[in-house]
Every structure is written in structure tokens, then in C-alpha cells.
Amino acid sequence: MTDLDALRDLLREDSPYRTAPVSRLGYFCAPFRPSGGPLADKIIKIYRGLPDNAALDRLAQCHDDYVAALVKTGVPMPLTEIHLMDMGGARIPVIVQEALPDGTMMRPLMQSASLAETLDMMQAAGEVIATFWNNADQFDTRIGFHPSIRNFAIVDGGAVFFDSFPPLIHYTRDEVGKMLLQYSDKRLMRLVGPFLQKKVTGIQDEWYSAPETLVGLVGSACRLRPDDAEAYLDWGRGFAKSAMPRWADEAIAGMIEAPRLPSYWTGFRKVLGLQGEPNLKK
């Protein structure tokens, strides 16, 4: 269990243990690892609060349910908790997650490793995707999964998934679409997004489709290493047949050529200054 007093102290802007973000790839927040103190072995993710207490309570419950569901399907995850912290008269969602070993993030590993090594990483991540979808039928509720390369670590040869926000369980499509704006830490997105709500809502559709999550993983690899795209496409088509036969036809149809990100999403990321290149089409 998280030491909530230590967490409250850490959330103060003058905390000596506040450090620079460990990643700037995120859409909702910039996670950091404390430089010392009781939470030095954790990753801290601070999200925007809302004035709607009922919505925050629901968020926390859905997050608990989502982490439990991921673990139940067999998805490897670090210990992950959410807390609604009272700070300055507002309730702030904060996720506290067991830190993964340095040097294990899949994205930079994919950029620096040999082709053979990256194919092993793709296999590890693909096995997690297949495990989730092959076991997700047990839940009588809307549930999704966002297994992008930047949401995996590679630890001892296996893939570990660490993205639990927004919790992709119980919420309707329209509700998730609104959450993509409500919890964005980019003011520009919150201002402009409502005028593009239909496009914003569509961002999530891949996360609720078994074949599209696999296609999305392969597409990310192709954009990271375009010279090796054909090898990743070959791997993806073979993996779909062997590990995800229920969705193989649809997945293979999406991997005839290197998948592209929707232009509106790449546009959002560029306008918001989110890092990720060369994982974006120019």
C-alpha cells in the first residue's frame, strides 16, 4: 500500500524529491520517479482533477476494476494503484506504480537493438496482446486495451504493460471520448478538442478492437524502423494466424502494407508538442 502522507508531501511543488519527467511521450501527464524518499521506487503520474466528485469516484473505481481485469486476463503489470488526493481544495487523481528497471522501455530498445532482437520484443508484446484478447470474453462489460510500443517494457525477455489510464472498462464510447479531453494536460487540446469531438472520440476505436491493436503495434514498429518494415509485417501476419486466429483475417488485411496513423491524430500530437518522432508520419 502507498504511504499517502509521503505521497501528499511529494505532490507539493517544493518537494525536494520532485524530478524531471521520465517520459514526455504521454498525452495525459508527464510521469516522474522521485529522486529519494519513501516513494523512490515508484513512478508517479499526476492527472487533472475535475469539479465533479462523482465522476472522480467512478474513475477511481473503474481504474481498480481495470487493473484487476488486466491482471486476470494474464497481462503482466507492475503493482499499480490510484489515489484521489485532496490538494488545495481539489481532488487530484494520482497513479502510483512500481518502477520498472532502468533501460527496459520497449520503444528505445526497439530503436537501438538488432532486427532479430526487435522481432523477439515484438513477439513478447504480441503474446501479451493475444493473452488479453483471448481471455477478455469473460468480462460482461465494454473493455479495451492500448498496447502500443511506448506502453511496454521488456524485462527478462518478456513484455510488461504499464498503461492503465484512462481505465478502458465500463465507460461508453462517448464517455471515453470526453475523457480524452477532460483529462488532457494540454490546455490547447481542452479548448480546441470540443470542436473536433467526433475525431477525438475516434482515437479510442483501435483500443477496443483485437485485430487493430495488433495492427497498431506493427504499425508503430514500421514507423520506428521503416527500413525493417517488411520484416515486421511478415511477423505480424504470421503471429495473427498462430496466436489470434479468431481475428486473423481482419488483422492480416491491415498489414498488407505498413499501417499509417490517422492524419488527425498525428496533427494533434504535432500541435500539442508531444514527443514521439520518428513514430509519426512526416
Image (tube, helix red, strand yellow):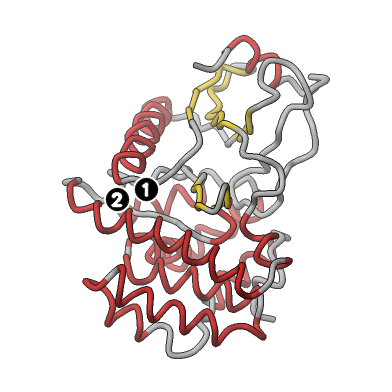
Q: Is residue 53 above or below residue 123?
A: above
Spot the residue most to the top.
Answer: 5
Q: Nearer the viewer, residue 3 or 61?
A: 3
Q: Which residue is mark 1?
A: 168
What is the number of the mark on residue 143?
A: 2
Residue depicted at x 32% and y 53%: 132
Q: Is residue 76 above or below residue 88?
A: below
Q: Nearer the viewer, residue 5 or 174?
A: 5
Q: Going from the N terminus, do you reach mark 2 or mark 1 first? A: 2
Q: Nearer the viewer, residue 164 or 46?
A: 164
> What amino acid is labelled 1 in the image?
Leu
> What amino acid is labelled 2 in the image?
Ile
Residue depicted at x 58% and y 73%: 221
Helix, strand or loop under label 2:
loop
Residue 137 image position (x, y, % from top left): 19, 53
Q: Is residue 50 above or below residue 226?
A: above
Residue 225: which quarter of the image? bottom right
Helix, strand or loop under label 1:
loop
Residue 8: which quarter of the image? top right
Whole-number angstrom distance, CA of label 2 to CA of label 1: 5 Å
Residue depicted at x 50% and y 36%: 78
Q: Is residue 193 left or right of residue 239?
A: right
Instruction: Rate crowding at label 1 as few (under 14), some (14 to 19) or many (20 or more) other CA atoms within 10 Å.
Output: many
Q: Is residue 40 left or right of residue 76?
A: right
Q: Are marks 2 and 1 in contact (CB under 8 Å)?
A: yes
**Number of callouts in the render?**
2
